[in-house]
Image: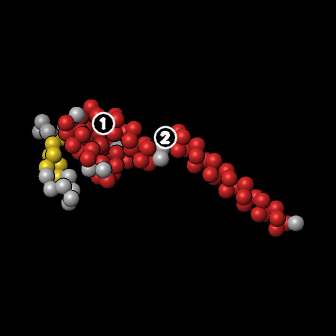
Amino acid sequence: MVNHSTIFLRTGQAIKEWIKIEPEAYRYMQQREDLWVFVRKNPEWYRYLSREPASIKEMEVYAKTFYGKTIPQRLEKTQQNVQMIRLLMEMAGAWND
């Protein structure tokens, strides 16, 4: 358990500085592996979270878009899969003729 009022994180190789993040936001990100990876791949979110820890909900929306988990993205992926199945069925039907 962390007893500090803030947690300092090093933001990566490209940005050589330390940024403080509130312990609640840090723990929340540690519990959600997808958010942790998203922040590691998008280090600008370290700064956003250090200034405004409540923006973690906004970060979740961006992470969903990043991972393709929004409803329009899922529908598009499903449509692509259906088209692929139709194409395979047409090809299989052509071989039977």
Relative to 93, does residue 22 appear above or below in the rendering? above
Residue that carries the numbered disc 2 in the rendered image: 70
**Looking at the picture, how far across and down is residue 79, in whole percent?**
63, 47
Residue 44 or residue 26, whichever sits in front = 44
Residue that carries the numbered disc 1 in the rendered image: 56
Element type where label 2 sits in the image: loop
Q: Which residue lies furthest to the bottom in this view?
A: 95
Specify whether residue 51 is in view.
yes
Q: Residue furthest right?
A: 97
Give the residue drawn at x 82%, y 65%.
94
Assess disc 1: are there few (<14), some (14-19) or many (≥20) residues with their C-alpha within 10 Å of its C-alpha.
some
State which quarter of the image contains the C terminus. Answer: bottom right
Residue type at numbered disc 1: Ile
**Looking at the picture, how far across and down is residue 4, in whole percent?**
11, 39
69 displayed left or right of 11? right
Q: How far apart are marks 2 and 1 (CA)?
A: 17 Å
Tell me, what colour scheme is on the image? Answer: secondary structure
